[in-house]
Amino acid sequence: MNFRRAKETDFDRITAFYRYAIEHSPGMAENVRWVYGQHPTDAMILGYLSQGAMVLLEDEHSIIGAMAVTMSQGEDYHATRWGVDAADDEVAVVHILCVHPDYQKQGLGKKLVQESILLARSAQKKAVRLDALSSNTPAHRMYQALGFIYRGKQHLYADNTGWTDFLFFEYLLNM
């Protein structure tokens, strides 16, 4: 297994990976509530690819995990009371973290999150931040087990869920 930054030429493989994972992952409808084309979207993935933010975990030549790690946060993160004051470009944010259904429950989600921490630390960020639907309790437990601190809840709109609660988490990087 190895991590690598995705290239734009990986687009078709990445979208096939997410489509398969959404269709076949246990608990997807109840916990994560992703619908391909609403979240994630082709445009979202292309945007992450153009930023160099997509990270793949591969076994041989198959994608078994993927995520985007952006080196800044958006405005939707401003309303949360964070543990460290930081400008938007002083934090990393994890998006669309996903493990292939055949590889779930093997610690790969943790490996992906740990990789995001390493990437943020090497970019000299102050923290790693992320959000998850309030219904995604398995992810909440994993984030907190890895040292992320719950920082609050926001009621936000997403195409795949409508108005719903998102929980925000932060991992502080001691620089």
Image (cartoon, grey):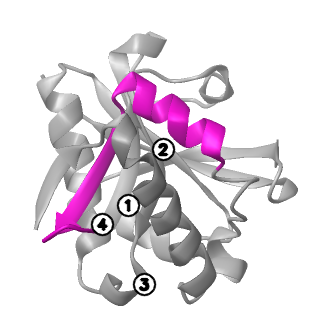
Q: In the rendered structure, which disc, 3 or 2, sits on the residue that comes first in sequence?
A: 3
**Residue linked to disc 4:** 63
Q: Which of marks 3 and 4 is in front?
A: 4
Q: Which of marks 1 and 3 is nearer the N terminus?
A: 3
Relative to 19, is 7 above or below?
above
User: Where is residue 64 shown, x and y percent of the image?
Assistant: 30, 71
Side (left or right) of 29 relative to 131 = right
Residue to which mark 2 is pinned: 130
Say which quadrant the N terminus sits in: bottom left
Q: Which amino acid does label 3 sit on?
A: Pro
In 3D space, how far apart are the residues under numbered discs 2 and 4 (Cα atoms)?
A: 22 Å
User: In the rendered structure, are the residues bearing label 1 and label 3 in contact, judged by CB atoms less than 8 Å apart?
Assistant: no
Q: Are marks 1 and 4 in contact (CB under 8 Å)?
A: no
Q: In this rendering, would 162 be left or right of 64?
A: right
Residue at mark 1 to residue at mark 4: CA–CA distance = 22 Å
Q: What segment carries the magenta color? A: 41-62
Q: Does the rendering let one see residue 144?
A: no
Q: What element carries label 3?
A: helix
Circle 3 residues within 10 Å: few <14, some 14–19, many ≥20: some
Badge 4 amino acid: Ile
Residue 152 percent across, percent down from the top left: 61, 45
Compare marks 2 and 1 and give the one earlier in the sequence: 2
Mark 2 and mark 1 residues within 8 Å of each other at the beta carbon: yes
Circle nearer the viewer, 2 or 4: 4
Q: CA–CA distance between discs 2 and 1?
A: 9 Å
Q: Residue furthest right?
A: 162
Q: What whole-number distance in Å separates the C-alpha atoms at marks 3 and 2?
A: 22 Å
Pointer 4: residues within 10 angstroms few (<14), some, or many (20+)? many
Numbered disc in front, either 3 or 2 = 3
